[in-house]
Amino acid sequence: MHTDLARNERAAGRRARLAWYVYDLGNTSIEFAIPLYLTIWIVSDLGVAAWIFGLASAGSSAAIGLSGPYIGVHADEAHARRRWFAASVLVAATLFAALPFLPHGGSAALALILITAMLANYFFQLSSLIYNASMLHAAGKANVVSVSSLGIAFSFLGGAVGVGIMELVIRGRLVPGVSGRGFALVPAALIFIACAAPGAFTRRLWQKETDQISIPSGRLHHRMKELWNESSREYRAGWFLAGYFALNSAIMGLTLYLPLHVQRVTDLEGTGLLLAVGIVVFTSAIGAGIVACLRPEGVMVKRIILVGLALLALNSFFFSLVTSLPLVILCACFHGLFSGALVPTVRGAFAQTFRSDYQALAFGLFGAVQRVSQGLGAALWPLAEVAGAHRTASWGIAGMGCLALVGIPLFARWRFGRPVAPVPEAG
């Protein structure tokens, strides 16, 4: 009898983790669709000024950064993570899918498209941070960093498949009479909601109404301050987030510079350039998969982050100097490998810096840092493109290497304490 119960528990845990991985797989379809299709469609095809789109995107990211922690506190204390997640997914998918069907003529129509796109982006980001809050539930007794890494590995592969489907749609090969970059958002939205559905219906990933939450006293700001102080005393969470700011800025900035640099140095265009970027996505999945297999704990997690940042920086400096196609592709692959290993390691580690009953608050803060740092890393990219100088992108890549080095002493001050106890299995 006891053996059967244990077997059923293990099977239920595997199903919960699978549902959690599936969301990661669909999430990246939207992540890839925004820069590859949405941005180009709105700026190049519809004629919205690039600086207007940039400011709107920054505003959307700032909005999630400012509101995410507060929504997270409410979701934690009201046992409402699941409701916030499902609502965010539905709103984001609906708005993304509606974009190509909105009127395109005139300034008012363009403004409506831009506002709709930014609202969709806001709710998409919100669903991600609420989803990350279920990481400890998904992991159960398994290694948290390993679960995070395997999810990211699936996400890269899912994103690549999603881009392939979107390419077929915009070229008119999948749905007769439907073509153009604007329609790329429709399959992306459908993939996203299909992949989010298993998680939304898996009770094991979410809080139960009977779960006890130890809520600090005082108003909202006092409660958040107390929770932050608690995490800072035990783990030095401030140094962690500062290091993550530098790391994510470097990774996102270099990722944006990468296709521009490859194009300028090797003269690759069209399909060739897309294949070069695809190789980076594939090696990113390999990097995440390697960390998943290692199942790191304790000091090994910190070692992966510090060594990975040093290797990322060295590769960036070398990348900025090479000009031959084989070496450029090799450096691009190393960038994918190192960043693919670093991102899920940091995500999994941060899940262990806050109490399990306040994970939505934790990832609200994590998401705020992620979106602001993403803006910093991306800020130099338009300048490099406008300048048009042959070596401008190279200097940008070297600059991202410097940012990676800045993250090393910051993460070195972070204290990785004992792994948190697994959260109780939901029924």
Image (cartoon, rainbow, N blue to C red):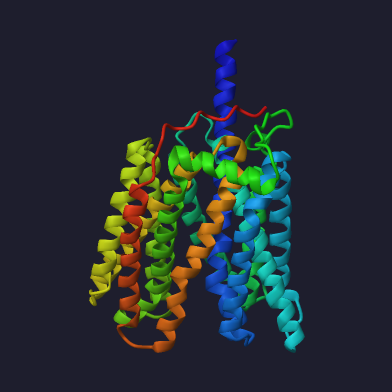
Q: Which residue is drawn at 24% across and 77% down?
A: 323
Q: Residue at x 35, y 75 (%)?
A: 396
Q: Residue furthest top?
A: 1
Q: Nearer the viewer, residue 117 or 417?
A: 417
| Residue 69 appears in view | yes
Q: Residue at x 63, y 55 (%)?
A: 68
Q: Which of 237 and 116 is in front in this view?
A: 237
Residue 56 position by quadrant: bottom right
Q: Is residue 45 left or right of residue 149?
A: right
In the image, is residue 245 above or below residue 218? below
Q: Which residue is drawn at 59% across and 77% down?
A: 55
Q: Nearer the viewer, residue 8 or 387?
A: 387
- On the image, the x and y values in percent for residue 283 come to 36, 57
In the image, is residue 420 above or below residue 81? above
Q: In which quarter of the image is the C terminus?
A: top right
- On the image, the x and y values in percent for residue 412 come to 33, 48
| Residue 267 appears in view | no
- On the image, the x and y values in percent for residue 280 come to 38, 63
Q: Quadrant of the N terminus?
A: top right
Residue 199 position by quadrant: top right
